[in-house]
Image (tube, coloured by chain):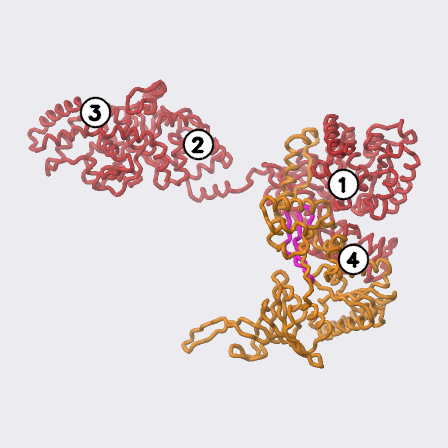
Chain colours: A orange, B red
């Protein structure tokens, strides 16, 4: 993303013009644009004109529209952002108040007008426009008969394909003729079938990799599995590439790294990214830092449970007490439609920074972010232990629950 | 259309005809001349007084046309010349005018060739004209008007039936003779002729011929004088041809059924090959039921009918046989030659295939094809079904009763667990060897091979580690299932992998087991490493207990490595005993056995010399005394699928797994979850032995029908449709934690089932002893605590679990919790 223009007033309202360059920028835009913001972007609108005779004629017209955002929708697979809103500036084609869904396009400027730019959103702009080195990783997390082909960028983990191929298990034929079974055809057939199944599985993964990965652009290609499946796949990939003389793979042979992980499920990426082989090559990337921070949090929870807290209320209290050393916030919280809530989290991030702590905004579509979301989207490692951060909470909730129940009863009574 | 094929097949004869045809019409032999002259005189005599003026030439032509039959010629001349005195045209020229199109006729010309030799011997047939036409037209390149005219009449050109000529030729064997019409039959031909004559003799005796058949026979065998017009007359449909009204002529025409132009290409193609085979009547004799039309008879040339043909035609084929005459009848299209007929006297490979196919599809289907299109489609649909082997009818066995009454040996499954390299596979390999399941020779062979790759001590393990990968790496990777039996019990060994990466496989194995054999490595340092926090001795034991295995046999292995040291054995058994009781195994369901897998000490036979301090039972004896846990045979059926495979051609879909509850028998309907597909049990195998029924506790292989293999995968559950499991997306678990638990992503394991899910909330932590709530909504659950958590499955389809199922939660290669679904 490139910053074209930025003018922010003293009251923090203002506009920013950005030039998205790659699909990942759509993700940034998704994190910047909130409902009630105003977005000006090139658009294609179908205009229907009616002649006097009543015949209609519709045309697709390229124009620039300014809309007040009502709903935004991000498609991670396609890297597309759809912004739905009402037109605020009239032009020849549309009148004020007409609805339009903008599809932000790459390589076309868009302007975002916010009534309030907070430090987090400005941080996102800064991050997005940081022209640092992009680390893009292809990863295949697999186990026998099951593979996830994913694509990891600085801010996103995109699952490209999930592959499931049945691989026959090893089986023994009859016991009555054990000797025969071992040496003669049936068992060989069974084993051959198993091998066949594995080969087929490898082949499907290979096809998927060649389809989804741009080997020259990727920094590393991780093959992660329990056991020896990843090694088997690696051998298969190179053998097949050699046989078919598939240059992109042969040229990027060094990029393939096999890593051990415990399952083939995609949540094993956490394990993969923190493994020493990967950590060494990706130490300075954002997602490696995020993964590390999450690890630290869980470690701390095991070591000293009173220095690791999660959940909005608990963390908020910890922040109020100035105890937070590292604050982990998922950016899903900043996408909240509730302005007050958004402000609350922004305030917490700012407080921690002010207090000399670090606050990390984790991408909610990274595996570490997904983990954090599981904890309520926010977690903190404290500098000193705090007890009973949650005690009043349970009471409150109980009373809160009571209130709600009371309201419900009232309603029923009414 | 396949007629092209006919042409190709018959080309050689066509060439022969080429040589021959040129002279056919022009070369009137001297004897013919003489006959013509004589006939002319006679005709003139007969015509005298009728006032008909006919030229000599015309009479001669007529004579020639009627094969010097004076009477017919007179008739003809009278009928034609009496009123109009129109000169008679040559037959072929008449045809010329009605030529729309000429189609294949080469095969017919071949028959014309064959007929030509004997033309004089067949004065009753008026085929000469045809012959000439054919003769000129047999080559497609030079398609003359005459030829076109002739072939216009061919059945494929919608010839009126009366015009269809049956070329009746005296028994000849064109193949037998030399090309060019030498007329001398080979021995083969002579044989064929002899046979034909014999058959003809038989026919003469046969008085029960069908009307149509007898007509043909008469036509073919009787003298011209005896061939009254009345015979053929009723056969002939009214004709529209104005100049072919001569009844005499009509009578001479013998109708030959022709392949219908509509015949499908495929069958037609078959017809070109299978000529002369009575088994494809719908192709050759499409109007079979029409009595006015004759089937060509090749009987004399035919060998015995194929078995298919016999079954297809039954009586009819014998009739055909009996109708053999001296005159071979040839279909115009693709006339079969003797050689062809010979070649097909036995069922051809195609026939065998066709017969087999039609046999498998049911003969009735094949017969139906002829009858009604609807039935035909039905039959086709039936034939298209992938697997329509009849399913055995459900025999309504009272399985439970049967089970109680059978006095078979007990079945016991045990899982072999322990740290990696504890010697699990070797111990089991030794066990199988000592029990005589594996013979000496095999072991020697394994030993030699293992030494070759530098793993000489692994040869016993190779009995169970059968994949190349396992052998070359020296690590068991997946459950190996083996059977052996002692005097009292049939055992199934489930040899689990010890490597931590394959713990999911171990879980799968343990969930099939009645009890566990924990193998410990007694050598210095090895036991300790397996017993550490991350060691699999510990993890496997806990898992086995969590999955529901309550009885455990501890085999202290590799005692040879510590010089059969009694102190080491006591040390290990004390430590383990303590740990096991902590893990929840009661002391009376725990037994310790010292042994050595490599040397075989105290496995099958006691080893007093090496273990003088041990007086207990051997490993085998201990196993036998381990009674399997009680089984829920009265509950609704539940089978967790362990493996899905193709059991062979007969059984395209097979599964293996353990019956956890209930019973089943062949013919039962099953429901697969979560795919919700139903299947029928086609066969049951228990320990690779076929069985009619099976009950809980059996490890079975089921052959299924009525389900596609894609709907089945390891970890799915098959249950009875009456009381199915409802796949769950989100459920509460009562867990025992082994690690700190927060809301987090976990792998959910149950048998082969391995799903991704997450703990979404911690509901409460509970007191270990009383089960009372300690804290509601705890932030996290420390290791070793009881708690209740809510788990959500990532996949939308859910996983097939129900209340009371034991599941294991794992994360990052560690077992974090084991729990029971609530």
Badge number at residue B789:
4
Between the residue at mark 2 and the residue at mark 4, the CA separation in whole angstroms equals 70 Å
* Earlier sequence position, callout 3 versus callout 4: 3
Badge number at residue B496:
1
* Earlier sequence position, callout 2 versus callout 4: 2
Magenta span: chief secondary structure = strand
Residue bearing the label numbered 3:
B225
Front of the two marks 1 and 2: 1
Callout 4 crowding tier (Cα within 10 Å): few <14, some 14–19, many ≥20:
many
Asked if residue B671 lies left or right of residue A291, the reply is left
- Badges 2 and 3, same chain: yes
Is B96 included in the stretch rendered in magenta?
no
Q: Do the residues bearing badges 1 and 2 touch, measured as CB atoms within 8 Å?
A: no
* Earlier sequence position, callout 1 versus callout 3: 3
- Residue at image point 28% right, 35% down: B139
Residue bearing the label numbered 2:
B312
Badge number at residue B1:
none
Between the residue at mark 1 and the residue at mark 4, the CA separation in whole angstroms equals 29 Å
């Amino acid at each position: 993303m490139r910053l074209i223009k930025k003018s922010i007033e003293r009251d923090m309202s203002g506009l920013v013009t950005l030039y998205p360059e790659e699909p990942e920028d759509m993700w940034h835009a998704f994190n910047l644009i909130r409902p009630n913001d105003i977005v000006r972007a090139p658009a294609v609108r179908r205009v229907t004109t009616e002649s006097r005779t009543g015949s209609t004629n519709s045309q697709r017209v390229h124009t620039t529209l300014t809309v007040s955002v009502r709903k935004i929708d991000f498609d991670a697979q396609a890297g597309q952002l759809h912004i739905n809103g009402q037109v605020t500036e009239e032009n020849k084609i549309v009148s004020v108040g007409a609805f339009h869904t903008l599809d932000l396009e790459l390589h076309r400027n868009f302007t975002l007008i916010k009534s309030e730019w907070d430090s987090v959103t400005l941080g996102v702009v800064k991050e997005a426009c940081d022209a640092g080195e992009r680390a893009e990783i292809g990863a295949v997390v697999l186990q026998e008969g099951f593979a996830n082909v994913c694509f990891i960028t600085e801010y996103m983990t995109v699952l490209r394909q999930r592959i499931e191929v049945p691989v026959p298990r090893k089986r023994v034929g009859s016991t009555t003729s054990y000797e025969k079974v071992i040496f003669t055809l049936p068992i060989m057939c069974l084993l051959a079938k198993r091998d066949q199944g594995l080969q087929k599985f490898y082949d499907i993964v290979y096809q998927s990799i060649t389809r989804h990965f741009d080997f020259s652009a990727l920094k590393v290609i991780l093959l992660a599995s329990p056991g020896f499946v990843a090694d088997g796949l690696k051998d298969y990939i190179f053998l097949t590439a050699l046989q078919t003389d598939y240059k992109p793979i042969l040229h990027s042979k060094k990029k393939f790294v096999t890593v051990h992980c415990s399952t083939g499920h995609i949540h094993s990426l956490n394990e993969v990214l923190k493994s020493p082989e990967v950590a060494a090559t990706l130490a300075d990337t954002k997602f490696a830092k995020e993964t590390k921070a999450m690890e630290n949090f869980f470690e701390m929870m095991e070591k000293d449970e009173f220095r690791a807290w999660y959940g909005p209320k608990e963390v908020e209290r910890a922040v109020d007490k100035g105890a937070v050393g590292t604050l982990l916030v998922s950016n899903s919280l900043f996408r909240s439609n509730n302005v007050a809530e958004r402000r609350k989290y922004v305030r917490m991030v700012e407080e921690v920074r002010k207090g000399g702590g670090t606050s990390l905004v984790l991408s909610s579509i990274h595996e570490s972010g997904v983990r954090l979301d599981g904890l309520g989207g926010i977690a903190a490692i404290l500098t000193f232990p705090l007890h009973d951060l949650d005690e009043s909470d349970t009471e409150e909730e109980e009373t809160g629950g009571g209130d709600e129940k009371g309201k419900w009863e009232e309603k029923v009574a009414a | 259309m396949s007629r092209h094929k006919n042409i190709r097949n018959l080309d050689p004869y066509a060439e022969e005809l080429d040589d021959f045809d040129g002279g056919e019409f022009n070369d009137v032999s001297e004897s013919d001349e003489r006959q013509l002259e004589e006939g002319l005189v006679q005709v003139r005599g007969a015509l005298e007084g009728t006032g008909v003026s006919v030229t000599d030439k015309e009479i001669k032509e007529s004579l020639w046309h009627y094969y010097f039959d004076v009477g017919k010629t007179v008739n003809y001349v009278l009928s034609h010349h009496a009123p109009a005195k129109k000169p008679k045209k040559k037959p072929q020229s008449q045809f010329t005018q009605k030529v729309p199109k000429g189609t294949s006729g080469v095969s017919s010309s071949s028959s014309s060739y064959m007929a030509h030799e004997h033309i004089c011997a067949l004065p009753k047939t008026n085929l000469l004209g045809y012959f000439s036409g054919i003769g000129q037209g047999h080559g497609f390149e030079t398609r003359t008007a005459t030829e076109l005219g002739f072939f216009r009449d061919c059945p494929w050109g919608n010839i009126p039936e009366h015009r269809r000529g049956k070329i009746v030729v005296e028994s000849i064997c064109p193949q037998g003779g030399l090309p060019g019409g030498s007329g001398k039959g080979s021995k083969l031909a002579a044989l064929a002729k002899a046979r034909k004559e014999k058959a003809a003799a038989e026919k003469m005796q046969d008085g029960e011929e069908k009307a149509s058949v007898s007509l043909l026979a008469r036509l073919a065998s009787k003298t011209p004088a005896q061939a009254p017009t009345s015979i053929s007359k009723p056969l002939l449909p009214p004709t529209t041809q104005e100049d072919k009204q001569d009844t005499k002529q009509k009578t001479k025409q013998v109708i030959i059924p022709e392949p219908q132009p509509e015949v499908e290409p495929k069958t037609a193609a078959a017809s070109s090959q299978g000529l002369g085979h009575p088994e494809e009547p719908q192709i050759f004799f499409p109007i079979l039921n029409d009595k006015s039309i004759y089937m060509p008879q090749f009987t004399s040339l035919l060998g015995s009918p194929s078995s298919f043909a016999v079954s297809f035609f039954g009586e009819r084929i014998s009739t055909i046989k009996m109708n053999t005459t001296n005159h071979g009848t040839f279909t115009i299209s693709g006339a079969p030659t003797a050689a062809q007929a010979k070649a097909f006297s036995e069922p051809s490979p195609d026939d065998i295939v066709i017969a087999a196919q039609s046999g498998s599809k049911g003969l009735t289907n094949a017969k139906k094809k002829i009858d009604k299109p609807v039935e035909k489609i039905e039959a086709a649909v039936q034939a298209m079904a992938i697997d329509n082997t009849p399913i055995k009818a459900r025999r309504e066995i009272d399985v439970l009763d049967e089970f109680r009454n059978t006095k078979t040996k007990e079945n016991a499954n045990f899982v072999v667990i322990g740290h990696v390299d504890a010697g699990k596979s070797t111990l089991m390999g030794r066990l199988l060897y000592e029990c005589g399941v594996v013979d000496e020779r095999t072991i020697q062979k394994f030993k030699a091979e293992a030494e070759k790759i530098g793993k000489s001590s692994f040869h016993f393990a190779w009995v169970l580690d059968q994949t190349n990968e396992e052998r070359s790496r020296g690590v068991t990777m997946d459950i190996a299932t083996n059977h052996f039996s002692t005097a009292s019990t049939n055992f199934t060994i489930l040899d689990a992998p010890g490597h931590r990466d394959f713990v999911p496989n171990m879980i799968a194995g343990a969930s099939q087991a009645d009890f566990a054999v924990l193998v410990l490595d007694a050598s210095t340092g090895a036991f300790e490493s397996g017993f550490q926090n991350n060691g699999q001795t510990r993890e496997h034991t806990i898992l086995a207990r969590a999955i529901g295995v309550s009885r455990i046999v501890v085999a202290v292995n590799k005692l040879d490595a510590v010089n059969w040291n009694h102190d080491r054995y006591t040390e290990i058994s004390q430590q383990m005993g303590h740990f096991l009781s902590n893990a929840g195994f009661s002391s009376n369901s725990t037994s310790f056995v010292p042994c050595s897998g490599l040397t075989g000490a105290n496995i099958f036979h006691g080893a007093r010399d090496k273990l003088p301090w041990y007086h207990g039972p051997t490993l085998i004896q201990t196993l036998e005394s381990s009674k399997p846990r009680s089984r829920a045979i009265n509950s609704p059926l539940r089978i967790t699928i362990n493996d899905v495979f193709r059991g062979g051609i007969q059984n395209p879909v097979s599964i293996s797994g353990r019956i956890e509850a209930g019973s089943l028998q062949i013919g039962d309907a099953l429901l697969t979850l979560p795919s919700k597909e139903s299947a029928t049990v086609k066969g049951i195998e228990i320990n690779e032995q076929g069985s009619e029924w099976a009950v809980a506790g059996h490890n079975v292989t089921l052959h299924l029908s009525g389900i596609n293999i894609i709907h089945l995968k390891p970890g799915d559950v098959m249950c009875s449709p009456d009381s199915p499991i409802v796949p769950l997306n989100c459920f509460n678990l009562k867990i025992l934690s082994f690690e700190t638990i927060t809301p987090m992503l976990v792998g959910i394991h149950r048998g082969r089932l391995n799903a991704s899910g997450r703990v979404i909330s911690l509901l409460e932590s509970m007191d270990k002893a009383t089960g009372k709530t300690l804290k509601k909504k705890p932030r996290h659950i420390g290791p070793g605590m009881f708690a209740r958590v809510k788990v959500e499955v990532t996949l939308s389809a859910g996983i097939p679990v129900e209340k009371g199922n034991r599941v294991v939660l794992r994360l990052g290669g560690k077992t974090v919790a084991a729990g029971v679904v609530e």
